Image: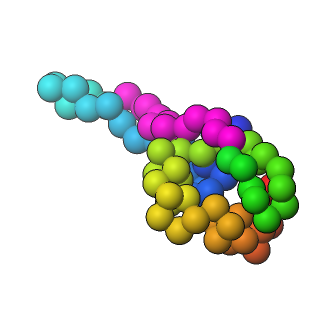
Amino acid sequence: MSRYCQVTGIKPISGNNVSHAHNKTRRRWKPNLSYKRYFFAEENRWIRLKISARGIRLIDKKGLATVIREMRSRGEKV
């Protein structure tokens, strides 16, 4: 899975475009992803994450150490 956030686990979802005439065509909503580097002071190294905008806000709120601990507990490689 290439288009997913490592912190929140959000991935693309699918649905329909609906026109004014109510014609339906399939489409996908992709998460707002970007690569971001964080310095992880506990291990004295840089960590590069593929992360959504919501994930960045989560790291700002909880702290990097807490988020990394939660990611490792669910099996994410960091």
Tell me, yes or no, if residue 71 can be seen here.
no
The magenta stretch spans residue 31: yes
**Nearest the camera: 9 or 14?**
9
Q: Position of residue 78 (x, y in %)?
A: 80, 55
Total marks drawn?
A: 0
**At 74% from the left edge and 56% from the top edge, which residue is drawn?**
40
Per the picture, the main secondary structure of the magenta-coloured stretch is strand
Residue 55 drawn at (x, y percent) = 53, 53
Residue 65: x and y in percent read 68, 67
Q: Nearer the viewer, residue 71 or 64?
A: 64
Q: Quadrant of the N terminus?
A: top right
Percent coordinates x, y for residue 59 in the rendering: 55, 59
Magenta-drawn segment: 25-37
Q: Is residue 11 above or below residue 9?
A: above
Q: Is residue 8 visible?
A: yes
Residue occupying image coordinates x 84% and y 61%? 43
The image quadrant of residue 17 is: top left
Q: Residue furthest left?
A: 20
> At 47% from the left edge and 64% from the top edge, which residue is drawn?
61
Q: Is residue 4 left or right of residue 13?
A: right
Residue drawn at (78%, 46%) of the image:
46
Residue 12 lies, with reference to residue 22, above or below; the image says: below
* Rendering colour mode: rainbow
